[in-house]
Image (tube, grey):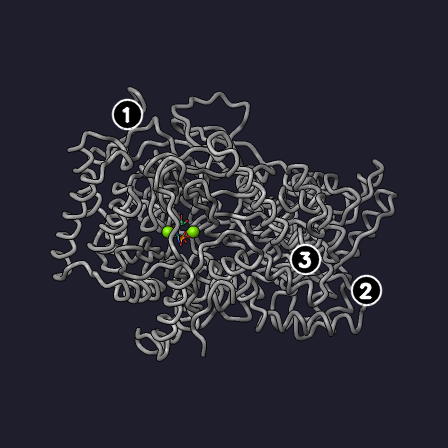
């Protein structure tokens, strides 16, 4: 097998083999852009490396040597030659880009001899020694595993001694001093001298890149982003170009469009006289790319052209790394840029309008789950804010939480459900776990492309960075803004869209959809064939759902209405009644209240179907807790309270105990309640129909769907259907209004699914209650599963996803498919939907599309997500 490809041998399509970086370096080389020459060691070689117990596969070294010789010839330079040393970078490059996860070594090939030659031949000793010390530092850290701060301390010391603020103010002599100390550190830490042979340096670096695939940061990143562990990484070896040779040099990163808002402007940052990581490391705060236009107009023009060309070529927004050496532009990387949801939408829509991509492609470009960012609450623009500081708006959205300075503590508090904001001078890949656990991130240094900013945008977390007016005092766990002291644990709010930092909690408002978002969703609606409804229990939720484009309500839970403070006592009266008369008296009190509920919801959804589920949960959910009641009785007895009060409580306790169930999830609930107490369902049906009749009289078009839960047998449905029909008839006669309604059932128990053809004869619609259907099919009670054994099941890869979040296609899905096929065989016009939480999850939505459901139903805030996911399922 061939393990090594020169850039001109590769292309963009070879991503799996060459990694993202290598494939794109090859593509840029082949379209004629200025790319320093180099070669890529394949991911295949990395996989073989692990198979062989972390050893290079046979033949790899020979191929590398051949390619080095080729590179030497191409450039007329030689590894280890003091008169013209070949210097290279060694860069990792996974198939899926993992920013900051793997490490790069620059200036490889320098040693005590070549640095002298380089200093002499360039006439720029300051630069030569700066390169060498960078090399020792990076190699020492990445390859030899010496902690960064050991080197940083030497550097700080030297700057202090020299009386300067920035690295680039140090002289050649300063750097020589630094190098001496660095080499001492290496000898102390590894017991050996810093390796002088360039070939040995190269092999060690390649080995380290392969090894870094399994470092902790990479493993965590893959876990969070669900990247498979067996892809391996490629290694790119590339001739160096230098951005740190003087003021006609520089290095930078740029996006072809603004990755935060999507605006079509070249967007980026650069630093003059700097190398590689300086821009993203937040060492000096970089300058906006527009400055480049002022300082090197010719180079800028060429760069802008190249960006435009790359965007046209890839038909997507690009994230580009470049270096300028003595006024010459070099391209070092391009990839499809990460972007916020807001930017993803705007870019996709505008690219359709520019004729660059199709509507279908635009639909596919936006990750539905990412839309969550936009459907969240944000800071009320009319609120009076007490802004204490302002940084760069690095990742939009608002967050509020307690200040924490340490990633481990952030993780710990986050796990306890506490809201925290991670605050630091900057973040590093070692802080990832803390960032995950935080509501948002605030840094005092670093630009829009700093680690914190890039990672936060990837996670969809609000981030403000480069907030230089805050002075962090780690020792005393506080930060200062002018005179103001903010201590660890104090609550702050940040707005990642404006860069503002506020003290305390600020008022938030509900989200609205931008015009571009609306447009994208309209295209999604044109494409999709799957309907989208919402689960809503109140008129307000129904109105919100409608605003977000819901085509009806797929589930109204009536029990939520029973839980209201003023109703609970009446509901309890109904439950505790010992005779039918008593129960009917309580029901009579509930009737007008329920009628009001249904009136509101049906009116908010006029013209669209509204599916209302009759009472479902176990009754004890409405009753007081038995233990608490027992304690209270004891207390009443001890204080010699009124005997009749004690007796009433004792009666209540007896009743509560008699209603307690061993396994309420499988107990007296759902239509079991309707079968034992038909008067309850009759009352609810009456409330629905009286509301319907009123609305019809008022001129509204309403379409109630009466849903019977937890059916297992067609006879249950037939019996309860009669109850509902009788009430409908009575209401029609009493009001003189004719109205239309349907009756159907939930499919949430395997028996119902298996007997779908029989049950369909008594139903106009089915709705999959996949929360319960998952519980009853797997035999997992959700609360117990998620609390006790789901994690090990996922970790041991027995289940690949939590089936309560992502629909279990293999098991539950099979029952659903069976249901659809058999029910539609006897009743082709049967409406079938889904109302479990899966109805708002993109992969589950895709499955619902595939098996031919009529609609999915999800929470109002997920409706836009579902509309997009339904369209994606189609294209
Ligand atoms: P990452 O994946 O972390 O971005 P890269 O391999 O892209 O790592 O390297 C980081 C930076 O190092 C690049 O953006 C570039 O500035 C610098 N760099 C890499 N290779 C070279 C090279 N051959 N010449 C000059 N600079 C380089
Ligand atoms: Mg890096
Ligand atoms: Mg890079």
| Quadrant that contains the N terminus | bottom left
Write down the quadrant of residue 616 in the picture.
Answer: bottom right
Placement of 790 over or under 284, stated as above or below: below
Identity of the residue drawn at 63% across and 59% down: 845
Tell me: is circle 3 under 8 Å from ligand 1: no
Q: CA distance from mark 2 to mark 1?
A: 67 Å
Q: Secondary structure at mark 3?
A: helix
Mark 2 / mark 1, whichever is N-terminal: 1
Spatial CA distance of label 2 from label 3 is 29 Å
Q: Residue at x 68, y 37 (%)?
A: 515
Query: Which marked residue is nearer to the observer: mark 2 or mark 3?
Result: 2
Identified at 36% across, 32% down, the residue is: 491
Give the residue at mark 2: 829
* Mark closest to the chain's N terminus, 1 or 3: 1
Q: Nearer the viewer, mark 1 or mark 3?
A: 1
User: Which residue position holds label 3?
Assistant: 678
Tell me the tag on residue 290.
none
**Contact? badges 1 and 3 (CB < 8 Å):** no
Q: Is residue 280 left or right of residue 702?
A: left
Of residues 10 and 728, the one nearer the viewer is: 10
How many residues crowd mark 3 within 10 Å: few (<14), some (14–19), many (20+)? Answer: some
Task: Give the spatial CA distance, label 1 vs label 3.
Answer: 65 Å
Could you tell me if residue 666 is visible in this image? no
Q: Secondary structure at mark 2?
A: loop
Circle on res. 485: 1
Residue 461, percent across and down?
A: 46, 43
Q: Residues within 10 Å of mark 1 (few under 14, many from 20)?
A: some
Apparent side of residue 770 relative to residue 103 in the rendered image (left or right): right
Q: Position of residue 631 (x, y in %)?
A: 34, 47
For disc 2, does the CB lie below 8 Å from ligand 1?
A: no
Q: Nearer the viewer, residue 764 or 173?
A: 173
């Amino acid at each position: 097998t061939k393990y090594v490809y020169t850039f001109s041998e590769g292309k963009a399509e070879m991503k799996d083999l060459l990694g993202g970086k290598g494939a794109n370096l090859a593509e840029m080389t082949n379209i004629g852009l200025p790319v320093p020459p180099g070669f890529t060691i394949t991911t295949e070689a990395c996989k073989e490396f692990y198979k062989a117990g972390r050893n290079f596969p046979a033949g790899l070294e020979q191929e590398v040597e051949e390619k080095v010789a080729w590179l030497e010839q191409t450039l007329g330079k030689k590894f280890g030659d003091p008169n013209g040393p070949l210097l290279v970078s060694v860069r990792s490059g996974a198939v899926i880009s993992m920013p900051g996860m793997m490490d790069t070594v620059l200036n490889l090939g320098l040693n005590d001899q070549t640095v002298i030659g380089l200093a002499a031949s360039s006439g720029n000793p300051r630069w030569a020694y700066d390169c060498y010390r960078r090399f020792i530092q990076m190699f020492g850290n990445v390859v030899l595993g010496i902690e960064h701060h050991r080197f940083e301390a030497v550097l700080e010391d030297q700057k202090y001694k020299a009386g300067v603020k920035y690295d680039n103010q140090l002289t050649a002599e300063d750097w020589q001093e630094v190098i001496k100390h660095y080499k001492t550190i290496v000898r102390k830490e590894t017991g050996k001298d810093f390796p002088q042979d360039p070939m040995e340096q190269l092999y060690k670096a390649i080995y380290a890149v392969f090894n870094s695939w399994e470092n902790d940061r990479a493993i965590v990143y893959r876990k969070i982003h669900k990247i498979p562990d067996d892809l391996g990484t490629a290694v790119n070896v590339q001739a160096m170009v230098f951005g740190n040779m003087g003021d006609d040099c520089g290095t930078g990163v740029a996006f072809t469009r603004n990755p935060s808002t999507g605006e079509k402007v070249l967007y980026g940052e650069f630093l003059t006289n700097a190398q590689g990581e300086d821009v993203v490391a937040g060492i000096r705060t970089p300058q906006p790319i527009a400055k480049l236009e002022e300082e090197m107009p010719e180079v800028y023009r060429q760069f802008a052209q190249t960006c435009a060309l790359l965007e046209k070529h890839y038909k997507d927004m690009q994230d580009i790394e470049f270096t300028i050496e003595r006024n010459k532009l070099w391209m070092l990387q391009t990839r499809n840029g990460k972007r916020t949801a807001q930017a993803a939408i705007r870019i996709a829509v505008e690219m359709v309008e520019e004729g660059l991509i199709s509507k279908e492609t635009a639909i596919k470009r936006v990750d539905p789950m990412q839309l969550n960012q936009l459907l969240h609450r944000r800071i009320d623009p009319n609120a009076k804010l007490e802004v204490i500081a302002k940084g760069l708006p690095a990742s939009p959205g608002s967050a509020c939480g307690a200040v924490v300075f340490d990633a481990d503590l952030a993780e710990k508090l986050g796990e306890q459900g506490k809201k925290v904001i991670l605050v630091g001078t900057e973040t590093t890949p070692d802080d990832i776990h803390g960032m995950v656990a935080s509501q948002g991130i605030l840094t005092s240094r670093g630009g829009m492309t700093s680690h914190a900013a890039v990672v936060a945008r990837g996670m969809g977390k609000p981030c403000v960075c480069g907030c230089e007016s805050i002075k962090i005092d780690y020792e005393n766990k506080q930060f200062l803004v002018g005179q103001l002291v903010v201590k660890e644990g104090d609550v702050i709010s940040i707005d990642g869209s404006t860069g503002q930092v506020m003290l305390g909690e600020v008022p938030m408002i509900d989200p609205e959809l931008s015009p571009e978002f609306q447009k994208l969703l309209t295209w999604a609606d044109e494409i999709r064939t799957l309907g989208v409804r919402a689960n809503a229990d109140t008129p307000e939720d129904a109105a919100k759902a409608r605003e977000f484009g819901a085509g009806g309500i797929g589930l109204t839970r009536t029990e939520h209405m029973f839980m209201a403070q003023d109703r609970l006592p009446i509901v309890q009266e109904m439950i505790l009644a010992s005779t039918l008369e008593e129960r009917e008296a309580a029901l009579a009190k509930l009737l007008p209240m329920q009628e009001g509920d249904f009136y509101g919801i049906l009116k908010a959804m006029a013209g669209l179907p509204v599916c209302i589920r009759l009472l479902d949960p176990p009754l004890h959910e409405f009753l007081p807790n038995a233990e608490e009641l027992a304690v209270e009785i004891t207390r009443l007895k001890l204080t010699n309270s009124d005997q009749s009060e004690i007796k009433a409580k004792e009666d209540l306790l007896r009743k509560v105990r008699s209603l307690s169930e061993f396994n309420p999830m499988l107990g007296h609930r759902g239509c079991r309640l309707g079968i034992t107490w038909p008067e309850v369902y009759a009352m609810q049906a009456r409330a629905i129909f009286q509301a319907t009749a009123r609305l019809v009289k008022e001129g509204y078009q309403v379409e109630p769907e009466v849903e019977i839960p937890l059916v297992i047998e067609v006879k249950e449905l037939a019996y309860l259907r009669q109850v509902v029909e009788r009430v409908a008839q009575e209401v029609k006669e009493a009001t003189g209004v004719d109205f239309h309604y349907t009756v159907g059932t939930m499919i949430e128990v395997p028996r119902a699914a298996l007997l779908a053809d029989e049950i369909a004869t008594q139903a106009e619609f089915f709705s999959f209650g996949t929360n319960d259907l998952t519980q009853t099919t797997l035999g997992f009670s959700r609360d117990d599963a998620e609390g006790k054994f789901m994690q090990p099941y996922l970790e041991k890869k027995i289940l690949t996803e939590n089936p309560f979040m992502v629909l279990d296609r293999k098991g539950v899905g099979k029952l659903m498919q069976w249901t659809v096929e058999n029910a539609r065989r006897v009743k082709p016009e049967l409406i079938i939907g889904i109302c479990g939480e899966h109805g708002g999850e993109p992969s589950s939505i895709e499955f619902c599309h595939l098996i031919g459901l009529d609609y999915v139903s999800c929470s109002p805030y997920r409706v836009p997500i579902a509309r997009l996911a339904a369209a994606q399922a189609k294209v």
